Amino acid sequence: MKPDLELRDYRRALTHSGDVSVGAFARRRRRTRILIATGGAALLLLAGVLYSFLRPPARTIPATFEVHVLCAAAECGHVAQLRVPVGRQFPIACPACGQHAARPLWRCHECSHEFLPRDESAPACPRCRSTKVGSAAASP
Ligand SMILES: [Zn+2]
Ligand SMILES: [Zn+2]
C-alpha cells in the first residue's frame, strides 16, 4: 500500500501547487493592474501639478497694487500704504482726513527718499537732486 499512498500524495501535491501558482499568478496580475492604475493616477496627478506650476500666470496678475500715498492737504500730510485697483486715478481719498488729496509718492533710487514731486514731468529728489526716481508703488 505504500506506493499507492505516495502516488496520491504526489497528485494532491501537484493539484495543490497548481492551485497555489494559479492563485499567485492571479494575485500578481491583480497587483500589476493595481500598480498600473495607481501609477497612471499618480502620473495624471503629477501632470496636473506640473501644469499648474508651468502655466503662464495669466490669472495671477493682481487687480490691485500697493502704493505709498501722501495726503497733499496742508493740515494733514498723512502718509499711508494703500492697496488700490490698477488704473485708479489719483488723487484718491486720504484715509486720515477723507479729502481727495492723497497722491502716490515717488521714491529716489539714490537715497530712498520718498517724496511728492512738484513737477511730475521732470521729477527730481528734493533731498539729493537725483533724477533717478520712480513710483514708490510696488510693481503690479
Ligand atoms: Zn489727509
Ligand atoms: Zn535722493
Image (spheres, rainbow, N blue to C red):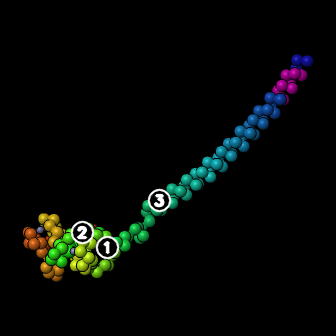
Q: Kindly state the secondary structure of the residue where label 1 is placed.
A: strand
Q: Kindly state the secondary structure of the residue where label 3 is placed.
A: helix
Q: Is mark 2 within 8 Å of ligand 1?
A: no
Please state the horizontal and vertical placement of residue 85, each as a whole percent of the image.
34, 75
Is residue 104 visible from the viewing direction of this image? no
Please state the horizontal and vertical placement of residue 38, each as a whole percent of the image.
60, 51
Q: Which mark is residue 84?
A: 1
Q: How many neighbours does mark 3 have within 10 angstroms: few (below 14), some (14-19), or many (20 or more)?
A: few
Q: Sequence-wise, which precedes: disc 3 or disc 1?
A: 3
Magenta residues, as a range?
4-11
**Distance between the alpha carbons at the discs numbered 3 and 1:** 32 Å
Up the image or down, 48 lies above or below 129; here it is above
Q: Quadrant where the N terminus lies?
A: top right
Residue sitting at x 81%, y 33%: 15
The mark closer to the camera, 3 or 1, is: 1
**Distance between the alpha carbons at the discs numbered 2 and 1:** 12 Å
Q: Quadrant of residue 20?
A: top right
Q: Amino acid at mark 2?
A: Ala
Is residue 41 visible from the viewing direction of this image? yes
Please state the horizontal and vertical placement of residue 96, each as a whole percent of the image.
24, 71
Residue 113: within the magenta?
no
Q: Quadrant of residue 108?
A: bottom left
**Distance between the alpha carbons at the discs numbered 2 and 3:** 39 Å
Up the image or down, 58 lies above or below 16; here it is below
Q: Which residue is denoted by mark 3 in the rendering?
A: 50
Tell me if label 3 and label 1 are in contact, CB under 8 Å: no
Q: Which residue is denoted by mark 2 in the rendering?
A: 80
